[in-house]
Amino acid sequence: MSTLIVNPPLTSADLDAMPADGMERWLVRGELREKPMTKRNRFHAGIEGTVVSLLNEWLWTQPKPRGRAFSGEVGCILREDPETTFGIDVAYFSAEVIAAQTDDTTLMRGVPTIAVEILSPNDTVQEIDEKVAEYLEAGVPHVWIVNTRHQVITVYKPNVLPVMRNLTDTLDAEPQLSGFRIPVARIFEE
C-alpha cells in the first residue's frame, strides 16, 4: 500500500528563507512558482518609472489620507491561507490598505487598487494569465499588462472583457482613482 505525502502550503516566510540565488519566486495559493530572474532593460525600467511617476502626479493632488504607489517588484500578499504572493512591477494601494500595514513583514498585505505588470522577454503567456486571474479573483479592480514591444496596454477589470489600449487611447482607473486619466502615449515616451 502506498502513502500519499502532502506537503503543507508554503508561506511568505518560507519564501524569505530561500536563498538569493538568481531565481524569481512567488506563491500561488501556497504553491511555489519560480524561474530565473529577468534581466531588466531600459524599456522595462523606463516604463516602470513613468507609470509610478504618473500615479504619483495624480496622488499628490488628492487630499490626505492618500494611498501610495510602489515600483520595483513590490512584494504583495494578495491572499492568505494559503498565501498568494507576487512581486508587482507597479502597484497603487489605497490609504486603507496602507494604514493596515504592520511591521511584521516587509511585504504589503492586501489588495492593490492597480497592479501593473510590464512584460519581460522571459514571461510566458501561462504565467501572465495566472497572475491576471489571481489579481482579479483577489479583488484587484484594475490590472494593466504593458507590452513595450507593441506599445499597447491590456486592461483587465473584474467581470468585464479585457480591453487593449494603444498610443491613441487614454487610460483611467475610474471610479477608484477619480480623475486619473493619462494618454497611453505618455507611458511609452522616451
Image: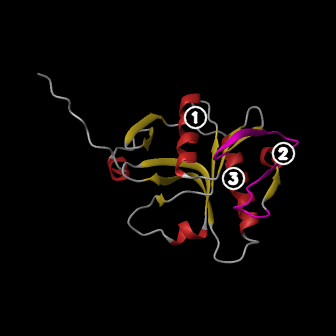
Residue 175 covered by magenta stretch: yes
Residue 185: give its label.
Answer: 2
Label 3 vs 1, first from the N-terminus: 3
Circle 1 Cα neighbour tier, 10 Å, few/some/many (<14 / 14–19 / ≥20)? few
Quadrant housing the N terminus:
top left
Query: As drawn, is 145 to the left or to the right of 134?
Result: right
Element class at badge 3: helix
Horizontal and vertical percent position of residue 158: 63, 47
Residue 129: give its label.
Answer: 1
Residue 184: give its label.
Answer: none
Horizontal and vertical percent position of residue 189: 82, 46
Residue 182 covered by magenta stretch: no
Q: Residue extending furthest bottom?
A: 64
Q: Which is closer to the viewer, label 2 or label 3?
A: 2
Q: Residue extending furthest right?
A: 168
Element class at badge 2: helix
Between the residue at mark 3 and the residue at mark 1, the CA separation in whole angstroms equals 24 Å
Q: How is the image coloured?
A: secondary structure
Q: Which residues are magenta?
A: 157-179
| In this view, 35 is above or below 109 | above
Circle 2 Cα neighbour tier, 10 Å, few/some/many (<14 / 14–19 / ≥20)? some
Per the image, the residue denoted by label 3 is 49
Q: Are marks 2 and 3 in contact (CB under 8 Å)?
A: no
Q: Which residue is pictured at 43% across the width and 69% down the height? A: 102
Horizontal and vertical percent position of residue 62: 73, 72
Horizontal and vertical percent position of residue 11: 35, 49
